[in-house]
Image (cartoon, grey):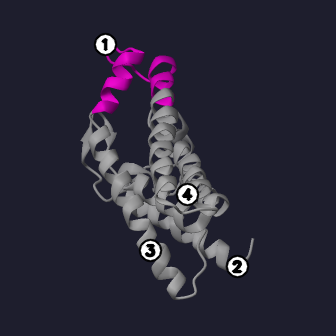
Amino acid sequence: MKANEIVLCALFAALMAVGANVSPFLTIGGVPVTLQLLFAIMAGGLLGSRLGAWSMTAYMFIGLAGAPVFAQFKGGPASLLSPTFGFIISFIFVAYAVGKCLEHNSQKVNYIYAGLLTLLINYGIGTNFMYAAFKWWADAPEGFSYTVAWAWMAAYLPLDSIVIIISLATLPKLRAALKQRNIKTA
């Protein structure tokens, strides 16, 4: 990796840490509300699939190393056992998928694909990990089932959809502004 690529990856890892703790005490059903999805999309859209995924991977390992960069200022290896850790894993794949969708052709239809993939990846990995964690090692609430896990996520769907739409609507303008300043994007 080149020095400027390392700096960009570090920048988006730092932005994820800030986005994770913008609203440290706002939770719905035990899941904190954050801006991490926005920054994962931006990382993929601005850095491309490879660097976007690397920046999200760096963020994950910084948190696992003990820095309090995860939501609610948490961090450390015990985070692997958190029911919400699957969402952190999903951000790596979200950044990669968004980057892949936009790298070769930034037509409007590719932004729609990127948005749909973001939702599928984030909810698919995150919700399935959460379900497994609650069933296998975390204390599952009474009556918890696979259907209940997905029903919990329905509360987040409107907010996440708005974040995805805003992120993807902003990306073309950001990419154009960076290109105008001769700053290379994906």
**Alpha-carbon span between mark 4 and mark 1:** 34 Å
Q: What x and y, as percent, mark residue 105?
A: 59, 62
Instruction: Indicate the amino acid at tag 2.
Output: Ala
Q: Which residues are magenta?
A: 129-154
Residue at the farthest top position:
143
Tell me whether circle 2 and circle 3 mark residues in contact (CB < 8 Å).
Answer: no
Which sits in the foreground, 30 or 33? 33
Is 67 inside the magenta-drawn segment?
A: no
Which of the two discs, 1 and 3, sits closer to the camera? Answer: 3
Q: In terms of secondary structure, what is the magenta stretch mainly?
A: helix
Tell me the residue that label 3 is attached to: 174
User: What kind of residue is marked 3?
Assistant: Leu
Q: Pick the quarter of the image with the C terminus.
A: bottom right
Q: Tell me the SS state at disc 4.
A: helix
N-terminal of the pair, mark 2 or mark 1, is 2
Labels in figure, total: 4
Q: Is residue 108 left or right of residue 103?
A: left
Residue indicated by mark 4 = 59
According to the picture, the residue beneath numbered tag 2 turns out to be 3
Q: CA distance from mark 4 to mark 2?
A: 18 Å
Q: Closer to us: mark 2 or mark 1?
A: 2
Instruction: Give the quadrant of the N terminus.
Output: bottom right
Quadrant in the picture for residue 48: bottom right
x then y, percent, for residue 103: 62, 62
